[in-house]
Amino acid sequence: MTTEPKVISLSERCRAHSGLCRILQLPFMLLLLFSTACSKGGDGHAGGTAMDSTLVITSLGDADYLNPVIGASVTSSNIFGLIYPSLLQSEFDTTTGLLNYMALEKQLRSSPSGHTAKTPKAALARTWRMAPDHRSITYTLRSDAYWDDGKPIVAGDVLFAYRLYGNPVIASPRQQYLAELEGAEKGEIDFSRAVMAPDDTTLVFRFHKPVPEYLALFHTSLTPMPEHFWHNVKPEEFRNSPLNRKPLGAGPYRLKSWKPQQELVLESNHRSNLPKPGNIPQLSFRVVPDYTVRLAQLQTGAVDVVENIKPEDFQGLMSSKNPVDIKNVGLRVYDYVGWSNIDQDEYLKSGRAVPHPLFGSAAVRRALTFAMDRQSIIDGYLGRYGVPAVTDISPSLKWAFNEKIQPYPFDPQRALSMLKAEGWVPGPDGILQKDGRRFSFSLYTNAGNARRNYASVIIQQNLRRIGIECKLEVQESNVFFDNLQNRRLGAWMAGWSIGLEIDPMDVWGSDLEKSRFNFMGYRNPQVDRLSALAKEKMNPLDARPYWLEYQEILHRDQPVTFLYWIRETQGFSRRIEGEELNISGVFYNIDDWTLSPSRTLAP
Amino acid sequence: MLTYIFKRLLIAIPLIFGVLTLTFFIIRLAPGDPAAFFIQPGISPNVAMQIREQYGLNDPLPIQYVKWLGHVLQGDFGRSFSRAQQPVLEVIASALPITVTIALLTLIANFTFGILIGVISAVRQNSFIDRFLTVTALFFYSMPEFWFALMMIILFALKFPLFPASGLNEVGAEGFGPFGFAMDRLWHLVLPVTVLSINGAAGIARYVRGSMLEVIRQDYIRTARAKGLPERLVIFRHALRNALLPVITLMGSSLPFIFSGALFIEVIFAFPGMGRVTVEAIFARDYPLIIANTFISGILIVFGNLIADVLYAVVDPRIKL
C-alpha cells in the first residue's frame, strides 16, 4: 500500500508541488493585491479630507432612539443632546460640584472662577422667574430660535413634549422629572394647570409643593419636541414611529446617516443658532464591541475617542505611534462590597427583618472593612485613577462631601479583636466561629468585570488571613441583578454610578418595599430623616450639615464596605483641541472641539 | 425523490413548531427581565411596569403563548425589545446580507483550500509535505478563533498597518464611487475571512485526507491505475469523487453557519451580523428576536440536512431515497 504514492512520476510530483505553491501563494497574492490597491486609498482617507473633517468616536453599543422622550442609553442621550435644543444651558461647576443653569440673560449662580465653558446662547429661555412661594416657575423664551425646517420653536413645543414625557403609554424613562408637577401627587399630572403656554414665548410650570429653584430648573428643562412634526403620531405608535430615525432638531449638529449597529454620522448644522453650528464638520459614532480592537484603532488613528480605558493599557497608549491623551471626568462611579444587613432568607419567607447571622451587626461590618486592604486594590489595579471611598457622596460633589471622614485603615489585628468582642473566635479549622456557626460565605459578582475580579481575589485573601472563609461566585449579569433585586444574596460586589442630584432614599431608605435598591435591607430612621430635611431646603448649600451627618452615619454603620471611587478614563487622540471633560459627561462641550490638521498633511 | 423531499418537509413543520414552543417557554423561565434596563435609580419604578405592559409581558404565560402563536401564524414575529422596536424580521434582514457575504466567502475558501490540502496530504501520505501540512493544519485548527483574530489585528492592523482593524467600510467610503466602495468593503473583509477560512480549511483538510486515504486503497483505484489511466484522472475523477461523500455532510451542516454568523469574528471586527444579533438578543432577554433567530436556524438545520441527504443520493447511485 505504501508504494502507491510512489507511482506518481517525478514530473507530476513537480507539477503537484508547483500547484501547491500556487495554491499557497494565492491568498498571499490576494492579500498583497488588496493591501496595495486599498492602502493607497486607505492612506488617502486617513490623511485626506474625510478623516480631517470627521471626529470618530467609538462606542460599545448603538444608540437606541434619537428621541429625548424615549432615548434611554448614554450613547443616545449624548447624540440627541447635540441634535435637539434645550431650554436652559447647564454647566457643572468643578469648584463646588454644583450644577449651574443658564438662560440667555440669567444664571442660577455666578461662576466663582468667572470661567464658563458653556455659552448661554444655546438656551431657548431668555430668563425665568421663580414664584416667591416656590410653587411655580415662569420662563420667557426667545423668539429667534427655529427648528431645522424653519418653523419657530415656541412654548407649545415644550408643553407638547411634557405631555409626551408624562404619558404612561409612551413610558418615558424621564417621567421621574415630572414628579413635582401639579397632580403628580395624586398619580396623574393635571396638564391643564401643571404646564401652560399662554403665548409663544411664555411657559409656566406649577408644582404641588414648594420646590427648590435648582431642582425646579433641573426638572423643567427637559428637551422640547417639535409639535408640528410629531402631532399626528399616536402615543401607542410613538416608539415605532419612523420619525425616530429622522429627528428634527435645532442644535449644533443634525443626523446625516445612521447604519444601525455600525455607524451614526452627525454633520454640523449650519442653520443652528443654538448656540452655533458645531466646529467639527462631522462626528461619526462607530460601534466597535471589542475593547482590544477599540484600543488598536485608537493607536492607529482610525478613531479619536475611546471611553473607559483600563488602567493596564495606559502605558501602551502613551507610547503608541499615534499620540493619545488619557483624560478623566471626575469621580462618579464606585464599587462596594454589599452585606445583607438582614437575614435575607427569613425576610423572603416571612417578611420579618431580623439581623443577618454574619453581617447583621455594624461592628462586624466595620471589622470586615478594617480587614480589607483597599489601598492594595487601588495601587494594584487603578493606580492614580482610584480614590478610597468612604460613603456614596462623591468627593467631586464638593459642596456636600465630608472631608473630615477618613477611610478605615487596613488593620487585620483590629478587625480580629473587634470580631472577638462580637463573639467570633477561631475554630478548630482556623475559621472563626460563633455559637457553632462558621464565618463562611459566598461573595457574588457579575461576570466580565476585570476590576471586580481583581478586587474580589484580594478581598478573599485578606479575609482568609483573619479566619473568614469567602468563596467567590461569578454570575451572568441578568441572573446577578435578578438575585440582587430579590434580595437573595448575602454578600456581593457591585458598583453604582451616581447622579448629580443627591437622593439616597432608593438605596438607603428604611422602607424596604419602597427602597428598591436597598439590597442590603439597611434600616436607619435617622438617615431617612436627614434626607427628608435636606430635600426641604430651598438652597442646596443649606442642606450641607444634613449631608455631612448622613455620611458620618453611613461611615459608622458600614451597611456596605465602600471600596473605591473610579476616575473613568477616556483615550483622546491629540488631534482634538478644546475638549473639556467633567462629571456631567465626556462630550460636555463637543460642539466647541476642533481638530488640528491631520499629521499626514503637515509638511 | 420528490415524494421523499415532500415528506421530510412535512415532518419539519411540527418539528420547528415544537422547537419554537420550547424556546418560547425556556427563555421566559430564564432569570432576567427584558425591562431590567429601566430598573435603576433615577428612573421611576412605573417605567419598567409600563414597558412590560407594552411588551405584553404582564399577561399570564398561556395567554402570551396563544397571542404569540396567532401572530406567528400570520407571519408576524413581533418587534424587537432591545433594538428600538424594529420589527424582528427587519433586524434579521439587515444582518443577514453581511453574515452571508462573510460566510460564503469563507465557505468557498474553506472547501477549496481544505479539499486541496487534504488531497495533497493523502496522495503524498507520510511525505515531508504531508507532515508539514498536517502539523500546520492541526496548529491552526486548535487555535481559538478569537485569539487568532486578535493576533491578526495586532500584526496586520497595528504593527504593519496593511488592513483595517474593524468595520465594514472606511470613514467617508460613500464618496469613493461604487467600485471604490466595493474594494474598500473587500479590503475590510480580508482579515476576518482569512481568520475564518484558515481555521475552517484546516478542519476540512483533515476530513478529506482521512477519507481520501481510505478510498485510494480500494481495488477500483488499483484497477484504474492498472488500466493505465493518468494519475491525475485516477485521483480527481475516481478517488476524489468518492472521497468527497463525507464532505457533503459537512457542506449540509455548514448551511446554518452561513446564516447564523460567526460571533467572535463579528464582535472583534465590529460587523453587525447574525451572530451578534443572536447573542445580544439573549443577553437583553429580547424574546421576539430570540424566537425569530431560533426559527431561522431551525429551518436552516432542517434544510441543510435535507440538502445533504439529497446530494448523497445525487452523487452516490447506491443510495436510493
Image (tube, rainbow, N blue to C red):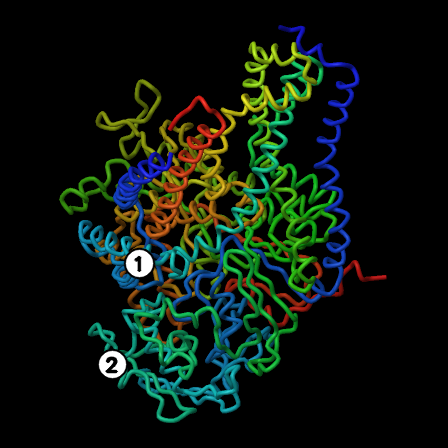
| SS under mark 2 | loop
Q: Residue at x 72, y 59 (%)?
A: A45
Picture coordinates of residue A268 (x, y %)? 61, 74
- Up-down: is A432 above or below A252? above
Q: Residue at x 50, y 41 (%)?
A: B258
Picture coordinates of residue A382 (x, y %)? 55, 45
Binning the other alpha carbons within 10 Å of mark 1 as few (below 14), some (14 to 19) or many (20 upward) gives some
| SS under mark 1 | helix
Asked if one can make out residue B135 in the rendered structure from this viewpoint, the answer is: no
Picture coordinates of residue A180 (x, y %)? 30, 75
Binning the other alpha carbons within 10 Å of mark 2 as few (below 14), some (14 to 19) or many (20 upward) gives some
- Quarter of the figure with the N terminus of chain B: top left
What residue sits right under mark 1 in the picture? A506
Q: Are marks 1 and 2 on the same chain?
A: yes
| Amino acid type indicated by mark 1 | Asp
Of B236 and A392, nearer the camera is B236
Instruction: Using residue B130 as the reference point, say whether residue B2 is left or right of it.
Output: left
Q: Chain of mark 1?
A: A
* Quarter location, residue A272: bottom right
- Quarter of the figure with the C terminus of chain B: top left
What residue sits right under mark 2 in the picture? A190
* Quarter location, residue A544: bottom left
Asked if one can make out residue A517 in the rendered structure from this viewpoint, the answer is: yes
Q: CA distance from mark 1 to mark 2?
A: 26 Å
